[in-house]
Amino acid sequence: MKLLLNNIFYSFPVQLLMLHFRKYQVLLLFWALMASTINSGFMKSYGADALFFVPEYLGEVNALSGALVGISMGIFFMSWNITTFILHTKRFKFLATASEPFLKYCINNSILPLIFLTFYLIKSIRFNINKELFSSSEEFFMVLGFIGGLALLIFISFILFFGADRGIHRILHPQIKKEVLDKADIDHPDTDGTDNFGLNIGHYFSTRFKLRKARSVKHYDQEFLDSIFKHHHFAAMISILFAFIFLIAGGFFLDVKFFQAPAAVSITIFFAIMVAVIGALTYFLQSWSMLFIIALLVLVNILYQNEIIDPRNKAYGIDYTNKSERPEYSKKGLLELCTPENVNADKANMLSILNNWKKKQQSEKPLIFFINVSGGGLRSATFTINTLQKLDSITNGRLMHQTFLISGASGGMLSATYYRDLLLLKKRNPAIQLNNPVYADNITQDLLNPVFSSLVSRDLFSPVQKFSVGPYQYVKDRGYAFEEKLSENSKGVLNKQLKDYSADEKAANIPLIIFNSTITRDGRKMMVCSQPVSFMMKPASFMADTSLSPDAVDFAAFFAKQNPHNMRLLSVMRMNATFPYVLPNVWLPSSPVIDVMDAGLRDNFGQETTLRFIDNFKDWIEENTSGVVIIQLRDRIKDNWHELKQPVSITDMLIKPATMLQNNWFKLQDYFESNEYNYLNSGFNKINRLTFMYVPEKEDQRAALNFHLTAIEKKDVIASFNSGYNQQELNKLLTLMK
């Protein structure tokens, strides 16, 4: 038994595995990231696990998309083998004179890939059957596709390397024989695999998976052995170069559907290249590698500061070229927008819209509705579109007919904006059925795959590609990929510009929408609307106080010289839904430059905007309506005591002060909005609030907050409309509308 254990311990596979953990641990980080992602740990809130389990290719999730992920996984495995082969072969010199050394190395280096592969397949099968509701046959073909793709890549790789190994062996065979003859008079034990690095290899698996004793190479000259390995290293690095070229080409042709590989493919190949790059830096630069990385970062920073490279994302449609007339982002610059003259003119314009809205109502004093939708990725988008369809259908279209303003954040606004466009289409084509489930399916399709594919393939590696909106050019990046996918999902309905809605909003043919985003510099709101809204830049009570800075910015007024109404609606929606890191912050042509991100950072529920609007026009509302109804559609439970978390470890105790604000962000917004509503309602008793909430069937299985939902999550979100709480709110709504 002792001998057996000793032989196992000193076997090539075990010694290789131990060596990976002893040396170059940074390479293991990529295995850890992959494993954590697949285990629904790393980036779970972004839906990263779903990218690997339900890869989308050409709009389908099937055996072909699974095969592409398998191929990319094979590239990662081979990159790992190639990189560690280059780094470690000097420690296993018995391979130098063996035939097919790289193939032997891969066979003996397969412990980690096999463990990972088994783990992936188990998690994938469970995820797809339990969460995506795949049938057994669907999952069988997905697994078959994955294994087939993986096997194909490995087979091709070994064919190439086998050919390279044979060529190298043919060239060097005469020299090997000469070395043997020259050193024949030296006595060396043939069964000792120890080299000058102190690694003792007893046995290894051959290409036929048979155990073989490691042969001594002490009688070979060190320089000669190194020359053999260099030939193999060159062949290995060529294959990595091909993977790099593939990623660049994929990014360059990303607009062609055929080249839109699943995000998991791009991510995995990116990891493969990073493993190779880190290995190359370590191999060639040795101890200088860290200094090289620091110098590279300094160089990139200098290029960025001098605008030689510019990775900043832009809002598509507005003018960034007019650098001499950029608006001043300062207290003075903002106050000049909300002068009494501007405020009165903009309020007069809005009053005309309110009067147009009233003319279209069926009673002398109708209820006026305001709809607020929460952020929350596709979770909120799914709840919003399905709830709007049901409410509007149950009320025979009266809800949207009597709705004046829609506001909110992120995912909820994607669906609300889409539903408004459908309403406009129905006015022109009465045959359209707004409650058709196909519309909900459209706007809730995956948005994550193209974003991550673009991030890896285009944002990081590919040459700069540009496109035009009107007379202006912009760089294609993951922001562009998001907009194009959103346009595709909506069947082109949302592919418009802000100016296309001005006439219909002014005539009150459709509800008004005020889009919000958050200025990262100081937390102010950026309000985007087809109508002028300078009266929204400060609370009404403080509008005349010039000592108080505006806490919001009228986008169109501020960027009046940058052609603001030319901006794509898709860009407006993206600015409203810029999920941190998933989508790039949008920078705007002001002086100094400002950038914006998700509206949810300031007001995730849209109520602040609504209450400020009501406050500005409460006299008109009092005179012309029978009351206000604010309908809030939320992707999370209000006053949720289930989310309370107790510290369960010393780590929790240490990080609690730093994460307190993050964990309570939405609760703090609720407290603020309730307080704000109370103040407004105390002097204005005509406000009714109704709240429809996503109530998960099981709190611990709540749908994830990202741009991808599983089939089971979608079913749960849709079914929550029928919860007891939401049905009570529905009855209140119907009672109010009688």
Image: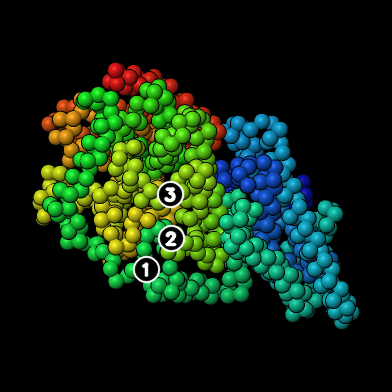
Locate the C terminus by quadrant: top left
In the image, residue 695 lies at what x, y percent?
41, 27
Q: Going 41% across and 75% down the picture, which residue do you hit?
A: 302
Amino acid under label 3?
Lys
**Residue 687 as seen in the image, left or right of residue 397:** left
Q: Residue furthest bottom?
A: 182
Based on the displayed image, in which of its 4 quarters is residue 323 positioned? bottom left
In this rendered view, identify the residue nearer to me: 191 or 567. 567
Between 640 and 349, which is closer to the camera in this rendering?
A: 349
Q: Residues within 10 Å of mark 1 (few under 14, many from 20)?
A: few
Pointer 1 or 2: first along the chain: 1
Q: Amino acid at mark 2?
A: Gly
According to the image, label 2 marks what residue? Answer: 470
Local SS, label 1: loop
Residue 578 visible in image: no
- Residue nearest the viewer, comparing 428 with 365: 428
Is 717 displayed left or right of 238 in the figure? left
Answer few, some or many: residues within 10 Å of disc 3's Cα (few below 14, many 20 plus, some between 14 and 19). Answer: some
Of labels 1 and 2, the one closer to you: 2
SS of the residue at dot 3? loop
**Residue at 69% across, 63% down:** 82
Q: Nearer the viewer, mark 1 or mark 3?
A: 3
- 143 and 406: which one is in front? 406
The answer to whether 39 is drawn above or below residue 7 in the figure is above
Depicted 210 relative to depicted 652: above or below: below
Q: CA distance from mark 2 to mark 3?
A: 12 Å
Amino acid type indicated by mark 1: Thr
Residue 673 drawn at (x, y percent)? 24, 37
**Relative to 189, 665 lies left or right:** left
Q: Which mark is residue 478?
A: none
Residue 321 is labelled as 1
Which residue position holds label 3? 496
